[in-house]
Image (spheres, rainbow, N blue to C red):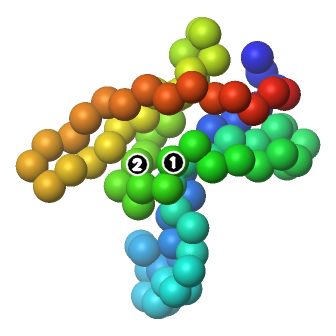
Amino acid sequence: DGLRIAYARSPKGLFGDQRPPRRQVTGLWTAALDRSGQAALTRGPSDNMPSWSVDGRVAFLRQGRRASEIWVVRCSMRG
C-alpha cells in the first residue's frame, strides 16, 4: 500500500565489536512510514530479507541449520 515498511531487526553488536544487549528483540517488524505503529511479524533471529507481496503478505527468508526456507505471513497491521 506504500504506507508501511517491513524490516529485519538484529541485535546490536551482531556485526561489530559490541556485545548485544541481553533482551534485544530480533525478527521481522513492520512500521508506518511516519515511524508509528510498529508491530512484530516474527521473533526469529534467523528471519531476514522481508518483501511485500501484492496481496499484503510478507515473504521472508528463514535460515536454518541445514537449509534456508521461504516463509509467508499475513500482516494484519493497517496503514
Residue type, label 2: Asp
How crowded pointer 2 is (Cα within 10 Å; few <14, some 14-19, many 20+) is rated as many
Secondary structure beneath label 1: loop
Q: Tell which residue pokes out farthest to the top in this image.
A: 54
Image coordinates for residue 65, horizontal then vertical, percent: 14, 55
Q: Residue at x 57, y 25 (%)?
A: 74
Which residue matches tag 1?
42
Residue 1 appearing in the image:
yes
Q: Is residue 8 above or below residue 59?
A: below
Q: Work out which quarter of the rendered image holds the N terminus and state it.
A: top right
Q: Are marks 2 and 1 in contact (CB under 8 Å)?
A: yes
How crowded pointer 1 is (Cα within 10 Å; few <14, some 14-19, many 20+) is rated as some
* Left or right of residue 61: residue 50: right
Q: Residue at x 42, y 34 (%)?
A: 60
Image coordinates for residue 67, horizontal then vertical, percent: 14, 43
Between residues 76 and 37, which one lies in front from this camera angle? 76
Secondary structure beneath label 2: strand
Sequence order check, earlier mark of 2 and 1:
1
Q: Work out which quarter of the rendered image holds the C terminus and state it.
A: top right
Residue type, label 1: Thr
Residue 7 appearing in the image:
no
Disc number for residue 47: 2
Disc number for residue 14: none
Q: Tell which residue pokes out farthest to the left in this image.
A: 66
* Left or right of residue 65: residue 33: right
**Rounded to the nearest whole Å, what is the CA distance between mark 2 and mark 1?**
8 Å
Q: Is residue 50 above or below residue 54?
A: below
Q: Residue at x 77, y 21 (%)?
A: 2
Q: Residue at x 51, y 72 (%)?
A: 11
